[in-house]
């Protein structure tokens, strides 16, 4: 049995699918966890990967508990529950924050969805740990793209807190880039639209401009890459995430956070042949990284290692 604290609705479904695929009966953490674990959340979404919700008092000692917030570890231990815990790092924090806030108490393991976090855990050797990008669970059309649009697309919630809004506005207003921003305010012009409509806009764009400083791993990046859409990254993203499988000029473009530099990338990707080639290259590297035939045995081995801890 596994119980998952829903900190992110996409991540919750991915984790449910991962666990169910290796034989787990999966439950969402129920309302009784609200007064126990920090950052408790449950949206009430009914997912086929989940058998229902689990009350804290009904959770067996050998159940596996998954969360992304490390402060849930001492909170659960304080209730007398000493079962295995797996912290899955999709909360957008890096190694420095984690080293200060993560404490091993009993059977605890780490699964990183960011290479930077995975490398740090490997070096620290605090507990059983692994790093791989998760399988993506969603209705992504991964067939070859045939058309290339004439607008850039950025997808980030609260771009005012996560990116450089003045540069996005310059690219929005320039007829050569016509950037569209999705995810929700701030800024006020950032749109929220249904997922199906978003996927259509994404697949029809020229490229995704992912102006964000850090990701773990970045569901928008996965969605763009799997759709065959080329991605333009800032250098900071590549440095902070330590993502090695995206290669500048081959499977992505890496440009300074300046309007003219982005417009040079737009010019290059306006060549349909180059656009489709780079988008396909990015799609292939992500498909390889998330291959569940490769990663499922690693996931199972990690959980077994956590269970063997004293």
Image (cartoon, rainbow, N blue to C red):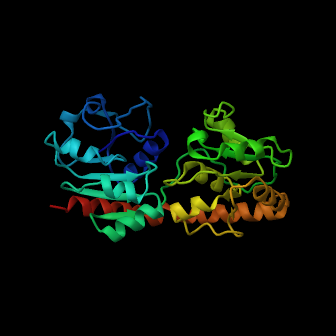
**In this view, 238 is above or below 26:** below
Q: Is residue 229 above or below residue 16?
A: below
Where residue 66 sits in the image (x, y, percent)?
A: 32, 47
Q: Is residue 143 above or below residue 47?
A: below
State which quarter of the image contains the C terminus: bottom left
Say which residue appears at 31% left-offset and 52% top-offset.
101
Q: Is residue 135 left or right of residue 249?
A: left
Taking the spot 85% from the left edge, 61% from the top edge, the residue there is 271
Residue 190 picture quarter: top right
Q: Residue at x 25, y 60 (%)?
A: 306
| Nearer-the-camera pick, 22 or 283 | 283
In the image shown, does 55 or 103 lie closer to the viewer?
A: 103
- Residue 43: % across, % down: 43, 30
Task: Pinpoint residue 67: horizontal percent, then vertical percent.
Answer: 34, 46
Percent position (x, y) of residue 123? Answer: 35, 71
Would you identify the image quadrant in which residue 52 lies?
top left
């Amino acid at each position: 049995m596994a119980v998952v604290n829903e900190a992110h609705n996409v991540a919750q479904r991915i984790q449910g699918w991962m666990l169910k695929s290796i034989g787990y009966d999966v439950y969402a953490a129920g309302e009784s966890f609200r007064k126990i674990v920090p950052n408790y959340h449950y949206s009430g979404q009914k997912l086929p990967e989940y058998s229902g919700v689990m009350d804290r008092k009904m959770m067996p000692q050998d159940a596996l508990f998954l969360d992304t917030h490390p402060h849930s570890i001492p909170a659960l231990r304080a209730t007398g529950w000493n079962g295995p815990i797996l912290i899955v790092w999709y909360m957008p924090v890096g190694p420095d924050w984690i080293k200060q806030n993560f404490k091993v108490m009993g059977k605890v393991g780490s699964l990183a969805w960011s290479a930077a976090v995975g490398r740090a855990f490997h070096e620290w050797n605090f507990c059983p740990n692994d790093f791989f990008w998760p399988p993506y669970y969603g209705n992504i059309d991964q067939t070859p793209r045939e058309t290339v649009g004439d607008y850039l697309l950025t997808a980030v919630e609260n771009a005012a807190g996560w990116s450089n809004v003045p540069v996005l506005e310059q690219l929005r207003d320039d007829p050569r880039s016509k950037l569209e921003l999705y995810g929700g305010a701030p800024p006020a012009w950032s749109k929220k639209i249904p997922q199906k409509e978003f996927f259509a806009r994404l697949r029809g764009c020229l490229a995704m401009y992912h102006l964000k400083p850090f990701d773990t791993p970045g569901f928008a990046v996965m969605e763009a890459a799997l759709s065959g859409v080329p991605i333009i990254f800032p250098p900071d993203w590549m440095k902070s995430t330590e993502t090695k499988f995206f290669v500048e000029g081959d499977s992505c473009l890496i440009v300074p956070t300046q309007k003219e530099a982005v417009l040079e990338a737009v010019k290059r990707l306006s060549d349909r042949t180059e656009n489709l080639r780079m988008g396909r290259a990015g799609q292939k590297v992500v498909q390889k990284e998330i291959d569940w035939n490769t990663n499922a045995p690693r996931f199972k081995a990690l959980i077994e290692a956590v269970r063997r801890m004293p």
